[in-house]
Image (cartoon, rainbow, N blue to C red):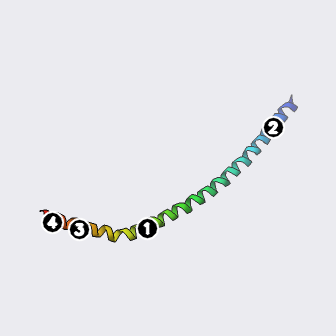
């Protein structure tokens, strides 16, 4: 009876260790994915900044034209 309980406890400890190893592997994979996602997000932010820098003068010019047209129609 004590031997059976000890074996059951030992099996539970071994299962816990196995699950702990799986968890550590999953955490490691998640950290890698986070780093990749951060790199992607940084690249997207840079692309947005470039687009805004290039588009801003054009958008300002369009707004000037719209303002002139609005004044002309009044």
Q: Quadrant of the C terminus?
A: bottom left
- Estimate the spatial distance between the alpha carbons at disc 3 and disc 2, rounded to whole Å: 78 Å
Query: Mark 2 or mark 1: which is in front?
Result: 1
Helix, strand or loop at label 3? It is helix
For label 2, the crowd category at 10 Å Cα-Cα, with few meaning under 14, some 14 to 19 and many 20 or more, is few
In the picture of the structure, the residue carrying the numbered disc 2 is 11
Helix, strand or loop at label 1? It is helix
| Residue at 83% from the left image edge and 32% from the top image edge | 5
- Estimate the spatial distance between the alpha carbons at disc 1 and disc 4, rounded to whole Å: 32 Å
Q: Are marks 1 and 3 in contact (CB under 8 Å)?
A: no
In the picture of the structure, the residue carrying the numbered disc 3 is 65
Helix, strand or loop at label 2? It is helix
Query: Mark 1 or mark 4: which is in front?
Result: 4
The label number, if any, that marks residue 19 in the structure image:
none
- Estimate the spatial distance between the alpha carbons at disc 2 and disc 1, rounded to whole Å: 56 Å
- Estimate the spatial distance between the alpha carbons at disc 1 and disc 3, rounded to whole Å: 24 Å
| Residue at 81% from the left image edge and 37% from the top image edge | 11
């Amino acid at each position: 009876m004590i031997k059976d309980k000890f074996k059951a406890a030992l099996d539970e400890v071994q299962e816990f260790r196995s699950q702990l190893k799986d968890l550590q592997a999953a955490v490691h994979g998640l950290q890698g994915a986070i780093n990749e996602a951060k790199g992607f997000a940084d690249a997207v932010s840079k692309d947005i900044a470039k687009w805004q820098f290039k588009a801003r003068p054009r958008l300002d010019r369009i707004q000037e034209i719209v303002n002139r047209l609005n004044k002309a129609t009044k």
